[in-house]
Image (cartoon, rainbow, N blue to C red):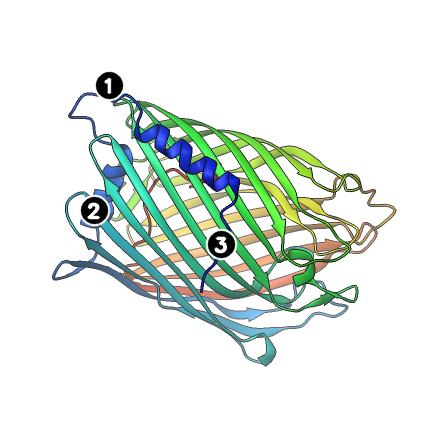
Amino acid sequence: MMRIRISGHGALAAALWACLLAAPRQAPAQVRTWVGGNLEQMVEGARWRLGALRVNAAFNLANAGYDSDIYYGFRSAPTPDVTASASLPLQVILPLSKKVVIDVTDAPRYSFFLDAADQRSWNNVLDGRLHVALNRIYVQAGGGMSNVRRRLSPELELNVRQKANRVNGLVLWQASETTSLALLYNGAQFSYGDVFIDGRSIADRLNRNEEFVDLIGYVQPSPRVRLSLDGQYGSYEFRRSGPEFRDAASYAFFASAEFIPDISIGDLELPRELRGTVALGYMMLDMKDPGRQDGSGLVGEATVSARLSRRMSGQVFFSRGFQFSIYSGSSHYLATTMGAGLSRHLSRKASLSYNFTYGLTTYPGLDVRSDPNRYYRYLTHTLRLGLRLARHMDVSFYGSFGQRQRGGAETLRDRYFGGLSLTYGFVGGGMSAPSRGGVR
């Protein structure tokens, strides 16, 4: 059974929710929350209707091809293999009324390796949410669980089993047509398989409970732009006892801008000017153990597309955040990823794109020259041809070339991948709503 301890911070979130619900209602009666409008679009946009149910379903084949090194250059010699990942994402939406909706998503997935049989795995991610959309108040409560074997971080060359149980909720108050206020709570338990590093299980170092409370204010000056400010408090409690006391708290502030598209050319949707989200801020990570190094710095995520011409668009993306380290000598590190790309729409059913991605890890308070193993960086180039074979069938053929470096003096290691991805059906998915750190 899922058990997540709700600390005093959870009680604080409940109290703040009550304050929001009791706030003066000065908005005109015809005002509707922007999240409620997105919920309506999700319900009406479902592909199939089975009585009262709305259903989206698909078959997805991803990364089916040849990989020159399935361990990303972390072992002494490359390990080539043929790989594929098959999944059946399913979303079921049940409108109980015009104002109350339940939606459940499930995504079972099988990862296949031709030669490395020990890397094959069954995986699943399950989420459920209850939506209540009133005139000026929107409430969402939900949770989920995941059991996924994946490459955990730049520090690990192995796929590690990660299990997570989550609970979350939000209350949004639409103060006027252009302003709103939201309160969010997120709680999660993370558990990891017993993979040993430096003679000790990473479960001893990473099994933990996390809780976050966000208070977000929104201003929407136009139908195509939504701005927000987010104040966040987080806590991290590590569950296994031992000599490594890693409990911590975090304090963060984010400023976000969301750009909403409204133009399409045939079956291709292109941004008029900008499309995407920028959510950047500053975080302080306070380690409870005075002997451990605190952390602070720029964090956030950004993915923005721009229409450069009728058939050409460009994209830039950025991600930076703290992660807890698997090593005993380092509590945490900063992982930074950035990149850009171009897409050329050859026709209504074909597109050609190029992207490059650069990543780097840094350890606060640690000199790379004194411990060169605490250094990882990579650069990847990807060329992709996308084709729409039928109304609900898309296939992409792509190839990538990457170089990774581990250790300050170690030479770059090459990795190649060539293959395809295919989607048949209607994936559906979520909706734009307030989220932790302003990330969509």
Name the residue that disc number 1 marks. Answer: 26
Classify mark 3: residues with Cα within 10 Å, few (<14), some (14-19) or many (20+): some
Q: Quadrant of the C terminus?
A: top left
Q: Earlier in the sequence, mark 1 or mark 2?
A: 1
Q: Which mark is residue 4?
A: 3
104 or 390: which is nearer to us?
104
Which residue is located at x 35 percent, y 58 percent? 387
The reply to whether dot 1 and dot 3 touch (C-beta < 8 Å) is no
Name the residue that disc number 2 marks. Answer: 100
Say whether residue 274 is visible. Answer: no
User: In 3D space, how far apart are the residues under numbered discs 1 and 2 (Cα atoms)?
Assistant: 23 Å
User: In 3D space, how far apart are the residues under numbered discs 1 and 3 (Cα atoms)?
Assistant: 37 Å
Name the kind of residue labelled 2 in the image: Val
Q: Is 380 situated left or right of 6 in this image?
A: right
Residue 235 % position (x, y) = 58, 42
Per the image, label 2 sits on a secondary structure element best described as: strand
Name the kind of residue labelled 1 in the image: Gln
Which residue is located at x 74 percent, y 70 percent? 77
Per the image, label 3 sits on a secondary structure element best described as: loop
Per the image, label 1 sits on a secondary structure element best described as: loop
Q: Earlier in the sequence, mark 3 or mark 2?
A: 3
User: In 3D space, how far apart are the residues under numbered discs 3 and 2 (Cα atoms)?
Assistant: 26 Å
Classify mark 2: residues with Cα within 10 Å, few (<14), some (14-19) or many (20+): some
Q: Earlier in the sequence, mark 1 or mark 3?
A: 3
Above or below 307: residue 4: below
The picture quadrant where one finds residue 386 is bottom left
Judged by depth in the image, the label closer to the viewer, 1 or 3, is 3
